[in-house]
Structure formats: structure tokens, C-alpha cells
Amino acid sequence: MSANEALLTLEGWYTYHNFRTINWEKWRAASAEERQAALDELNGLIQTWEANEAENQGSTAFYSILGHKADLVFMFLRPTMQELDEIKTAFNKTRFASYTEAPYSYVSVVELSNYVHNPGEDPKANPHVRDRLYPILPKWEHICFYPMNKKRDLQDNWYMLSMQERQEMMRSHGMIGRSYAGRVKQIIGGSIGFDDWEWGVTLFANDPLEFKHIVYEMRFDEVSARFGEFGNFLVGNVLNKETLAKKLEV
Ligand code: VOV
């Protein structure tokens, strides 16, 4: 094995998942005028996110999260970390934020690992590559998010495998992934140095069973079976301004 077989990675937009729980007791106790003012202010912010996406300067999606880990997730992609920080601060200053808690967040950067590439080509000049580095979030019916690592045990250490071994396993992974084309869209966020895990995986599908099927199928594939370590899974249903307002009716 050569001493430096670190992989070249390509990075695109920075990503921030802002998970929120709603303090329903506090929200219910607020006056109807206060709730309306909070909603109007939140809608104003959503309009700025929509304008940003229309100008291709980022992308935003928000979902209603199932289970007790969170009630909502706002997912942001932006060209710089500064913009993500401004978004966080602007959200936290809203009235609506004061009726919520923040149980979890995740920071990463959209990443393509260059395992499968055409030698001699400038990957960032390739429109397919650009579409994947700077993706517009699809707003499909469902989202699934989970963080993951590749194992670093003495027996099974991903980072001590040769480039060829890793390439072969990633080729097999890519082939399984491609069999879900049009049904599952994945955004892989690289988070080494940014957050607690090595990657944040965000999947979108119109049928939530696709998440169960793809994750299960990948567990049998060597790269996930031997090396995949996973954090909490969160799953949700798409929201827009209208359905968010409906969810917040009391
Ligand atoms: C829609 C499904 C889908 C498709 C098409 C797909 C394809 C591909 C390709 C071709 C490549 C390599 C080149 C690149 O493009 O980066 C990757 C890379 C990666 N993947 Fe993937 N993946 C999918 C889906 C998919 C899922 C469901 C998971 C979670 C794994 C699981 O067990 O739960 C995952 C993870 C990753 C990761 C963490 C990486 C980076 C690994 C590294 O070591 O750098 N991925 N992936």
C-alpha cells in the first residue's frame, strides 16, 4: 500500500440541517395575533430562501419529522459557511424560533468522492458533476437523514485499504445505488472536520419504503456490511408554506 492513497474529493455547496421540536404548550399559550405575527415573519424568511433558490445561489427544503427526535427539519445548501451562519442566526432571531427547541443539527459539504472518474477530464467542467455538487433539493414526499462513518478497527480499517480495494467496493455500492435511479435521490455531505460523523446521508423518495429497501440492500454490500457505522435515522414528510401553516394551527 502506498503511503498516500487519500482520495481526491470534490466539494460543492455547504449544508446545514436544522432539526427543531415545537414547544406546543408555549405555542398554544400565545395569542392568535402573536402566532400570526410569528408565522408571517417565518413566511418572510421562507420567501428569502425561495428567492435564493430561484437565483441558483443555494437550495432549501423543509420536512415534518416523525417520531420524538424532532418535529421539523430545515435543510439548507449554500455556497459559503458564512451564509449558513447568517441563516441560523436569522432563524434564531424569529419569534417562531422562541417556540421551538433545537435537538440536533448537522453541518457538512456536498461531496463527490472521485472513485469513479474519467482521467484527464476536469470534473467541475462536467455539467452532470456540477448538478450533483450544486443540487436543487427535489422536495419529494419524504426525506431520510442519517450520519455515518467508515470503520477504523484494526481488523476492518477503511482508511488502510488500498485505493483499488476501495474503488472496487465503491463501484459495487454505486451499482446498487443506480438501480434506485429516479426513485431515491441521495445527497452525500462530507463532514470530516465539520461535525461528529464522517458523512451526513440525505435521501429523498416519494415512497418511504424505498429508504427501507435501499438501506437494507446496501447492508448486504461489502462497503456497508463491513465498514458502515450509522448514527440516528430521521425520516419525514415534505412541507411547504401552506402545509407548515396548517401543521401550526391550534
Ligand atoms: C440513490 C442511490 C445512491 C447512488 C446512486 C450512490 C452512488 C454513489 C457513488 C457512485 C459514490 C462514489 C462516487 C461519488 O459520487 O461520491 C458514492 C459515494 C458514497 N455513498 Fe452512495 N449512492 C447512493 C446511496 C447511498 C446511500 C443510501 C448511502 C448510505 C450507505 C448505507 O449503507 O446506508 C451512501 C453512502 C455513500 C458514501 C458515504 C459515499 C462516500 C464514500 C467515500 O468513501 O468517499 N450512498 N455513492
Image (cartoon, grey):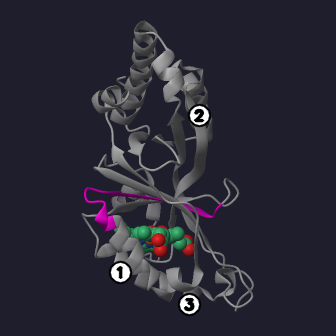
Q: Which region shows up in magenta?
A: 197-210
- Ligand 1 is found in which quarter of the picture? bottom left
Residue 141, horizontal then vertical, whole percent: 28, 49
For mark 1, does the 10 Å Cα neighbourhood hold few (<14), some (14 to 19), or many (20 or more) residues?
A: few
Write down the quadrant of residue 124 in the picture.
bottom left
CB within 8 Å, label 1 to label 2: no
Q: Residue at x 64, y 82 (%)?
A: 158
Residue 76, horizontal then vertical, whole percent: 48, 41
Residue 137 drawn in magenta: no
Is label 2 in a helix, a strand or a loop? strand
Residue 145 numbered mark, or none = none
Identify residue for label 1.
Answer: 175
Identity of the amino acid at label 2?
Glu
Identity of the amino acid at label 3?
Glu
CB of mark 1 near ligand 1 (< 8 Å):
no
Q: Can residue 149 be seen in this view?
A: yes
Q: Is residue 146 left or right of residue 210?
A: right
Q: How far apart are marks 3 and 1 (CA)?
A: 16 Å
Identify residue for label 2.
Answer: 101
Identify residue for label 3.
Answer: 165
